[in-house]
Amino acid sequence: MTSISDREKAFENKYQHDEELRFKTEARRNKLLGLWAADLMGLTGDAADEYAKTVVKADLIEPGEDDVKRKVLKDFESRNIDKSEHQLVRMMAELMDEAKKQMQE
């Protein structure tokens, strides 16, 4: 009986660790996305960092990444930056790969 309990506990711990790592990686991706978007909008320094934080916070609104896409696309539209949703999704995928690399280091 103890070995089954031990396995359950190990599985729960691994699941918790994996979810925490996924959350941190997505947050890192969103920060990188925010810095990329800030650069396109002409924001630099503290303004770029603050904007990146708003992108990270946008991901906490609802599950998934649609809230992040909506925020960035809306901000692009308000500044007349010509980027499509497809381009944004592609950049998010590239930055997810970069975030994973950074998290492994």
Image (spheres, rainbow, N blue to C red):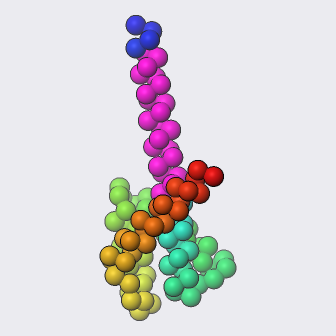
Q: Is residue 24 magenta?
A: yes
Left or right: 77, with 52 as reference point:
left
- Please tell me which residue is depicted at 59% across the width and 57% down the height of the picture: 102
Secondary structure mostly taken by the magenta-highlighted segment of the chain: helix
Q: Where is residue 65 in the image (x, y as percent from the top left)?
A: 37, 62
Asked if residue 32 shows in the view, the reply is: yes
Q: Does the magenta stretch include residue 11?
A: yes
Q: Residue furthest right?
A: 45
Asked if residue 58 shows in the view, the reply is: no
Who is closer to the viewer here, 11 or 51? 11
Where is 90 relative to 15, above or below? Answer: below
Who is closer to the viewer here, 73 or 7? 7
Q: Quadrant of residue 64?
A: bottom left
Q: Where is residue 70 in the image (x, y as percent from the top left)?
A: 36, 73
Residue range in magenta is 5-26
Quarter of the image containing the N terminus?
top left
- Please tell me which residue is depicted at 47% across the width and 25% down the height of the picture: 10
Q: Which residue lies furthest to the bottom in this view?
A: 80
- Please tell me which residue is depicted at 58% across the width and 50% down the height of the picture: 104
